[in-house]
Image (cartoon, coloured by chain):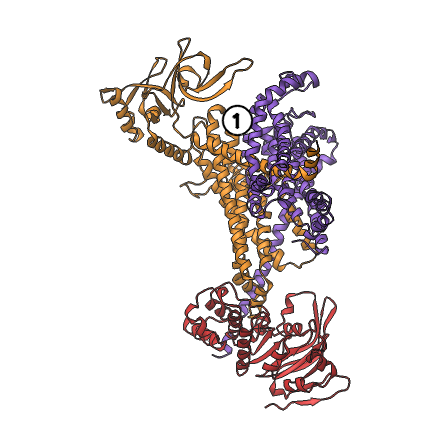
Chain colours: A purple, B orange, C red
């Protein structure tokens, strides 16, 4: 075994240098390509902004309005559910259940938008059209019934309290909610008779002049809310779960109830994290295309009514761009819409990321956290 | 009311929060259950009912659903009656009060035909080579003949009778399948269900998407996803290695990292616009001018196609692969890198022999997640190359076998198109449910694989340190 | 036995000198800084061939930094700057014609926590060999057996050479890492607290191994453990705040330290 045989070969170093150069070139190339998206959109939309054709920008107004309306409806539905679910699973749920529920809810995110849109447009929309009153009653009654379950629980005997603990409530509330939903459907005719003179849609038209479209903002809100829940939930849960435990225990040691500690301490500490979760959700709601395409009427209206449709920027791009002539006004306008979407989501995501990193550093300074 | 105050103080709020988890689970479960029952139930051979109305009219078909009558009591029932060639409609609403008699005769047949959709009625006689069979013999002849190749079936002439008494002569060559669901027992129904499911997975759409299957869409989706993975994997991994192993870890790298992460949140339609503008019109248009000038003005690469769709989705899923790979690389302890270097390995040797093998599961996770995202994505494809009905498969026996410029069918777009732009949406809906179920299953299975892989990876790493 | 010559300088740390033909490593006025913060200052010391030299000192004194500098592991980190020379067998390790990979082959390094690669035991030992010239399988097998035997591991693993190295115990893993290093036949073996993550029995085995290995190569050991340094090393260098305080034969340093600072540290009056 002589040393000479084990000497190094120049070829290896050459290979190493070439590979490093290749990886560097490839990596930088990929990053540039990604950057190219923004540059391209800006380049194509710029003539519109520079030309005197600025008047055509007014064509964007109903689209922008529709986008905002759809996103707001979705957030209105998704935020209470997602944040409530996050608070529950971070502070009250049994760890064993949590390790199963969290991935399950995160799987919701994987369900393709086209499937959600199909269910919303072809199943939910006709049903809601026929049962508008029932829908509203269910939407109001279900949260109340969850609260009712809580009150009944406090009244129940020790025995039942132990058999149906709060830490597993997410599971055993499901049959309760189903039963309560049934109850709501059954009682709807009574409610409709008492409150709205027997026909809600006629009542809405007479009292507020509201028209009803089969595919409307309410449907879009429900469907897109469903799609937004998982991303908001996942990020918000992470933020709440990282709140240093000593902080919570400190508050409880001072006599606060668990819920008071959540509200006063955890929400304040994780506030930025929740904010970034909401931002990410907003970004998703603004850019979602298929759900809006399938669940809204796609008519460019400037109406605030939740029972009328809208056309969003994303949907307009999907419908009109393939037919638009390259370089024409419509083409440039749609590219401008894409640029707006790009800038908005990029800005919102960056903001969320910065806020989240700052929060993480704060937790680390507090000496706790994960 | 003290108990109410008490209850509020002790906290109804946690229960509301628990309720939101329960409600979310409920919605998810309801969605999946709906897809499962409707998607799989469609293939079950449904009983055919012959209804005699008070007016003396006869309706025969499959009862689809009941609905309350608008503005009055009672309900009406929707029947699928088929026979569009004879009475110009496939559906019939019947008020339940108007029904005088119902029966489920065992000899009531349902034939699936190449044109005009299904026939529902009775078999009078079969003529073959001058011989004439009637009754049970005729049915046996038909069942035997259906296993023959189409060309030989043309000898068989069927005489059919509708429930209303019209007769119709039809060649067996135009019939795809025949069943008498009322006479079937459970085993036969299961068999028929299985073969229908298989037909759905393995055949092309027929009769304006109301019959047949989705094989070209499955194939198109798979091919697009494969071409996309071939593009995205090397570039994503390369970029991740560059960011994590080679780039100077300064503020610029951090900025780039945040940027890449945020691109995952940019709406997919924006990538579609980019793909259309740059790949299709820009690069595709130039390619046409240079190489396919004789075919102009009809575009070759200057229109949406498999290649552009794959490239667009590769760009869309690039952040997913980069982030997952980087996570995997960051998890590898520096001791491993130093160990390799201390033995005299160059950086390339350290990367290829120690670091990359350890990061493989993470890369795989990233690619699977990317594939799952791409399989479910529809919006950008509408701009860069999906087709309602592709005349030619993008892969065939003709040189160069893989036709990257051709348009292709995609499951998600097929679903959208059938449900919203179909000719007879009512008749196509059951197949849309089946398509939706298939799509959700594909995506969920891919995601589950990625989750399990990542879980396995973390546990393995955990036990080592 | 070597004939060390003690030189006393009132201003300089007491340093032991060796004749040129006995020096394996020569460190001459070597300084190193992390991002401008000095970690080693004007260090001068000679490491004799085929002996065990221990670096001791409080945490953060720079002993591990010095060890890593000998292997030029700091080249992975861009914020490190250095001055002065380190010479290995008469060759400056920072010289332009000194290939980094060749240096690292000649200077083996064993880290605090065992870091076997996620491969079989055989492949772990073969790793360094495969980087070099192609060997016939027979030859490679011989070297691997020899390396594992030298690391006192052969008998324990000869029946499961193709099992994963991660299934071995911590002590076995550390000996595997030593075998992996021995397989490429280095001149020097650097050990950075090789036993600090191990149980007492594994520690004793490693110490015995270190004593046995010095017939084959030069060993440099960094340790926190005074007894360990006393048990296995021939020479001991005491470092504090990046400076060499005292260097000499181990029994001298431990029984009759020259400086009060050294005595304080060794007797534990200063932790």
Whether residue A272 sits left or right of residue A318 in the image: it is: right
Question: Within 10 angstroms of label 1, few (less than 14), some, or many (20 or more) residues?
Answer: few
Q: How many numbered callouts?
A: 1
Is residue C58 or residue A4 the one in the foreground? Answer: C58
**What quarter of the picture does the N terminus of chain B occupy?**
top right
Query: Can you see residue C28?
Result: no
Quadrant of the image occupied by residue B137: top left
What residue is disc 1 on? B421
Quadrant of the image occupied by residue B132: top left
Chain that bears disc 1: B
Q: Secondary structure at mark 1?
A: helix
Is residue A147 or residue C77 the one in the foreground? Answer: A147
**What quarter of the picture does the C terminus of chain B occupy?**
bottom right
Measuring from the top left, give residue C72's x and y in whole percent. 63, 71
Measuring from the top left, give residue C88's x and y in whole percent. 61, 79
Q: Residue at x 63, y 28 (%)?
A: A141
Q: Residue at x 59, y 67 (%)?
A: B338
Measuring from the top left, give residue A251's x and y in whole percent. 72, 48
Whether residue B328 sits left or right of residue B38 in the image: it is: right
Is residue C53 or residue C32 the one in the foreground? Answer: C53
Measuring from the top left, give residue B174's x and y in whole percent. 34, 25
Q: Residue at x 69, y 72 (%)?
A: C59
Whether residue B37 sits left or right of residue B186 in the image: it is: right
Q: Residue at x 41, y 30 (%)?
A: B43
Height in image: B418 above or below C257? Answer: above
Q: Furthest residue to the top? A: B55
């Amino acid at each position: 075994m002589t040393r000479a045989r084990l000497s190094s070969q120049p070829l290896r170093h050459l290979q190493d240098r070439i590979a490093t150069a290749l990886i560097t070139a490839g990596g930088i190339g990929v990053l540039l390509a990604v950057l190219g998206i923004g540059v391209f959109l800006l380049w194509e939309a710029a003539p519109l902004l520079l030309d005197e054709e600025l008047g055509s920008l007014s064509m964007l107004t109903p689209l922008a309005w529709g986008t905002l309306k759809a996103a707001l409806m979705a957030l209105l539905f998704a935020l209470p559910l997602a944040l409530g679910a996050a608070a529950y699973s971070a502070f009250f749920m049994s760890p064993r259940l949590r390790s199963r529920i969290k991935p399950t809810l995160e799987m919701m995110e994987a369900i393709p938008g086209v499937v959600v849109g199909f269910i919303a447009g072809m199943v939910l929309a006709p049903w809601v059209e026929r049962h508008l009153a029932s829908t509203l009653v269910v939407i109001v009654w279900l949260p109340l019934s969850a609260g009712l379950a809580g009150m009944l629980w406090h009244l129940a005997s020790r025995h039942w309290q132990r058999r149906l603990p709060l830490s597993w409530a997410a599971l055993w509330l499901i049959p309760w909610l189903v039963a309560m939903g049934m109850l709501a459907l059954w009682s709807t005719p009574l409610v409709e008779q008492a409150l709205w003179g027997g026909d809600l849609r006629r009542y809405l038209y007479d009292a507020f002049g509201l028209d009803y479209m089969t595919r409307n903002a309410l449907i879009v809100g429900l469907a897109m809310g469903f799609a937004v829940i998982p991303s908001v939930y996942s990020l918000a849960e992470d933020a709440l779960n990282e709140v240093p435990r000593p902080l919570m225990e400190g508050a409880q040691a001072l006599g606060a109830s668990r819920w008071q500690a959540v509200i006063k301490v955890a929400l304040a500490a994780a506030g930025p994290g929740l904010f970034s979760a909401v931002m990410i959700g907003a970004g998703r709601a603004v850019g979602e295309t298929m759900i809006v395409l399938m669940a809204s009427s796609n008519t460019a209206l400037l109406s605030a009514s939740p029972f009328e449709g809208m056309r969003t920027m994303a949907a307009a791009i999907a419908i009109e761009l393939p037919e638009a002539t390259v370089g024409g006004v419509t083409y440039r306008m749609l590219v401008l819409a894409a640029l707006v979407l790009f800038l908005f989501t990029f800005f919102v995501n960056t903001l969320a990321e910065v806020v989240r990193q700052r929060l993480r550093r704060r937790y680390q300074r507090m000496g706790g956290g994960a | 009311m003290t108990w109410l105050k008490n209850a509020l103080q002790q906290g109804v709020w946690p229960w509301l929060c628990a309720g939101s988890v329960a409600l979310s689970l409920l919605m998810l479960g309801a969605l999946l259950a709906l897809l499962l029952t409707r998607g799989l139930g469609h293939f079950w051979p449904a009983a055919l009912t012959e209804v005699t109305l008070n007016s003396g009219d006869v309706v025969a078909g499959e009862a689809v659903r009941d609905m309350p009558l608008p503005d009055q009591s009672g309900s009406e029932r929707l029947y699928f009656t088929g026979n569009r060639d004879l009475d110009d409609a496939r559906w019939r609403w019947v008020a339940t009060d108007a029904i005088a008699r119902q029966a489920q005769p065992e000899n009531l047949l349902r034939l699936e035909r190449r044109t005009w959709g299904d026939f529902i009625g009775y078999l009078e006689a079969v003529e073959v080579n001058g011989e004439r069979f009637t009754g049970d013999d005729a049915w046996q002849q038909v069942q035997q003949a259906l296993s023959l190749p189409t060309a030989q079936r043309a000898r068989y002439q069927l005489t059919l009778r509708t429930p209303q008494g019209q007769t119709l002569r039809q060649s067996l060559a135009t019939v795809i399948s025949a069943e008498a669901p009322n006479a079937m027992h459970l085993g036969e129904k299961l068999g028929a269900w299985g073969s229908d499911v298989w037909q759905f997975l393995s055949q092309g759409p027929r009769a304006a998407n109301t019959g047949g299957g989705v094989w070209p869409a499955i194939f198109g989706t798979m091919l697009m996803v494969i071409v996309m993975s071939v593009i995205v994997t090397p570039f994503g991994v390369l970029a991740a290695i560059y960011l994590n192993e080679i780039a100077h870890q300064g503020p610029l790298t951090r900025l780039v990292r945040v940027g890449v992460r945020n691109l995952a949140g940019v709406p997919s339609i924006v990538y579609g616009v980019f793909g259309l503008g740059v790949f299709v019109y820009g690069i595709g248009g130039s390619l046409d001018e240079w190489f396919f000038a004789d075919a102009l003005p009809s575009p070759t690469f200057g229109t949406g196609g498999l290649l552009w769709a794959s490239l667009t989705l590769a760009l869309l899923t690039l952040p997913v692969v980069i982030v997952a790979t980087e996570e995997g690389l960051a998890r590898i302890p520096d001791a491993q890198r130093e160990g390799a270097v201390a033995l005299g390995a160059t950086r390339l040797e350290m990367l290829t022999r120690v670091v990359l093998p350890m990061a493989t599961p993470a890369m795989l996770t990233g690619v699977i997640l990317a594939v799952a995202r791409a399989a479910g994505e529809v919006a950008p494809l509408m701009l860069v190359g999906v087709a309602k009905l592709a005349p030619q498969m993008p892969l065939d026996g003709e040189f160069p076998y893989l036709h990257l410029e051709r348009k292709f069918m995609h499951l998600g777009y097929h679903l959208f198109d059938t449900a919203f732009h179909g000719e007879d949406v009512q008749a196509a809906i059951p197949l849309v449910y089946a398509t939706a179920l298939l799509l959700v299953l594909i995506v969920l299975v891919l995601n589950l694989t990625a989750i399990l892989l990542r879980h396995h990876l973390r546990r393995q790493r955990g036990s080592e340190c | 036995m070597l004939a060390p010559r003690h030189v006393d300088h009132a201003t300089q740390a007491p340093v032991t000198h060796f004749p040129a033909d006995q020096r394996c490593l020569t460190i001459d006025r070597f300084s190193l800084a992390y991002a401008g913060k000095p970690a080693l200052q004007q260090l001068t010391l000679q490491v004799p061939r085929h002996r065990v030299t221990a670096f001791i000192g409080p945490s953060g004194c720079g002993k591990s930094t010095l060890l890593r500098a000998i292997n030029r592991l700091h080249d992975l980190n861009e914020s490190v700057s250095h001055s002065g020379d380190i010479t290995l067998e008469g060759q400056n390790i920072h010289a332009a014609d000194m290939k980094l990979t060749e240096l690292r082959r000649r200077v083996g390094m064993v880290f605090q926590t065992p870091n076997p690669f996620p491969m079989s035991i055989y492949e772990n030992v073969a790793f360094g060999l495969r980087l070099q010239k192609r060997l016939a399988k027979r030859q490679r097998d011989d070297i691997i057996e020899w390396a594992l035997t030298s690391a006192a591991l052969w008998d324990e693993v000869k029946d499961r050479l193709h099992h994963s190295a991660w299934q071995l115990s911590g002590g076995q893993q550390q000996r595997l890492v030593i075998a992996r290093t021995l397989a490429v036949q280095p001149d020097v073996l650097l050990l950075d607290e090789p036993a600090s993550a191990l149980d007492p029995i594994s520690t004793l085995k490693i110490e015995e191994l270190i004593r046995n290995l010095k017939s084959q190569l030069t060993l440099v050991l960094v340790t926190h453990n005074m007894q360990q340094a006393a048990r296995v090393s021939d020479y001991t260098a005491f470092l504090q705040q990046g400076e060499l305080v005292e260097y000499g034969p181990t029994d001298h340093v431990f029984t009759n330290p020259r400086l009060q600072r050294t005595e304080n540290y060794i007797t534990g009056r200063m932790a």
